[in-house]
Image (tube, rainbow, N blue to C red):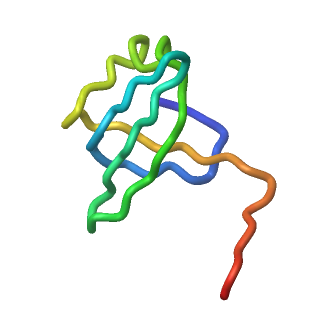
């Protein structure tokens, strides 16, 4: 797999919640942190995503916004 993004986080699919148009996919990383992504239902099918399957959260962004209380 090749991609131009600098951040690829490998984990396992923990949950998939299918909505009418989109799906919320939760990937659990080693150590227990989770990444949540909203993708199309079609993408869930095309990627063959299933709970327990290994997957990558690939993050490409020109900005990362941080905040504190």
Q: Residue furthest front?
A: 20
- Tell me what residue is drawn at x 50 percent, y 16 percent: 20
| Viewer-nearest residue: 34 or 23 | 23
Query: Whole-percent x and y of residue 53?
Result: 23, 33
For residue 15, side relative to residue 21 (left or right): left
Q: Quadrant of residue 16?
A: top left
Which of these two is toward me, 30 or 1?
A: 30
Can you name the residue that lies furthest to the left here?
A: 52
Q: Is residue 35 left or right of residue 4?
A: left
Is 41 above or below relative to 57?
A: above
Q: Write the residue at 73% across / 50% down.
A: 61
Q: 45 above or below 67?
A: above
- Compared to residue 23, the image places residue 13 above or below, namely below
In the visual, does 32 lie left or right of 42? left
Residue 63 in percent (x, y) is at 79, 59
Q: Quadrant of the C terminus?
A: bottom right
Write the residue at 54% across / 35% down: 38
In the foreground, 38 or 11 = 38
Choose top left, top right, bottom left or bottom right for residue 29: bottom left
Image point (33%, 17%), residue name:
48
- Residue furthest to the right in view is 62
Q: How many marks?
A: 0
Residue 3 percent across, percent down from the top left: 60, 35
């Amino acid at each position: 797999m090749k991609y131009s993004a600098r951040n690829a986080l490998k984990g396992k699919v923990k949950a998939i919640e299918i909505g009418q148009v989109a799906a919320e996919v939760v990937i659990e990383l080693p150590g227990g942190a989770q990444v949540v992504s909203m993708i199309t239902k079609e993408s869930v099918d095309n990627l063959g995503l299933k709970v327990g399957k290994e997957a990558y959260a690939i993050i490409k962004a020109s900005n990362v916004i941080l905040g504190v209380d």
